[in-house]
Image (spheres, helix red, strand yellow):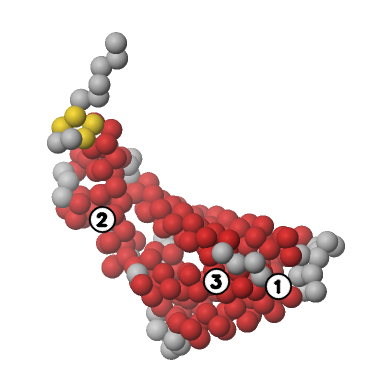
Amino acid sequence: MRSRPRTYGGQTTDERRADRRRRLVDAALEIWGDQGWAAVTMRGVCARAGLIDRYFYESFPDRDALLAAVWDQVRDETVTLLTQAIDDQKDPIDQLHAAIAGLVQVMVDDPRRARIGFGEHTGSPVLEQRRRDTLQLFTDLIVEAGRPYFRPDIDETSLRMSTLMGLGGFVELITAWHAGVVPAAPTQIIDHTTAVAADLAARYLTP
């Protein structure tokens, strides 16, 4: 007969470990969002999470692994948001508008996520690679969402180049906007970006 997992405070060992990991990730997200990724340290995160140092290494071998975990969490939540926004629309331009509006609204509601996703990552190889990979992931997402509406004879290489250019420009615009360099209202950012995206998409969409 299999024994039941031992519990403490109503949680099993695995549940307590998962809870400690979540607290570390949440603490790192707060510090990163407020001060930048370079401010994330093992001791600072443990202090914010209310945990002793040894629990850090229970979940993460080093700071880079923690930074990657924070990035991955924010990325996955953003992908879920964009996928839901796209799925709620039937017109490809409406899909673009909904995705852009959803992403901009997240930045307005929680500026910390803007710092994480669009802040400066130079000096952290793990984050620089994550940024490159995420651009490719979002390119794939947009291309596949639009595929039912594309002309049958489109040039796939041209399509991906245009999508990547559009995403790269959007990232730079949001970065400048978040830094106060572009003094625009959220609706201006959404409408302008949608118009530019629609122009890029027009050559690939079925009339």
Residue at the (60%, 67%) spot, across then down: 89
Secondary structure beneath dot 2 equals helix
What's the residue type where badge 3 is placed? Ala
Residue at the (50%, 58%) spot, across then down: 79
Q: Extreme bottom residue here?
A: 183
Residue carrying label 2: 27
- Seen from the viewer's position, the closer of residues 194 and 165 is 194
Label pair 1/2, CB-CB below 8 angstroms? no
Image: 55 above or below 201:
above
Residue carrying label 3: 98
* Crowd tier of the residue under label 2, counting other residues whose Cα lies within 10 Å: few below 14, some 14–19, many 20 or above: many
Name the quadrant of the C terminus: bottom right
What's the residue type where badge 2 is placed? Ala
> Mark 2 vs mark 3: which is more N-terminal?
2
Q: Nearer the viewer, mark 3 or mark 1?
A: 3
Image: 91 above or below 60:
below
Asked which quadrant contains residue 28, the reply is bottom left
Residue carrying label 1: 201
- Seen from the viewer's position, the closer of residues 39 and 77 is 77
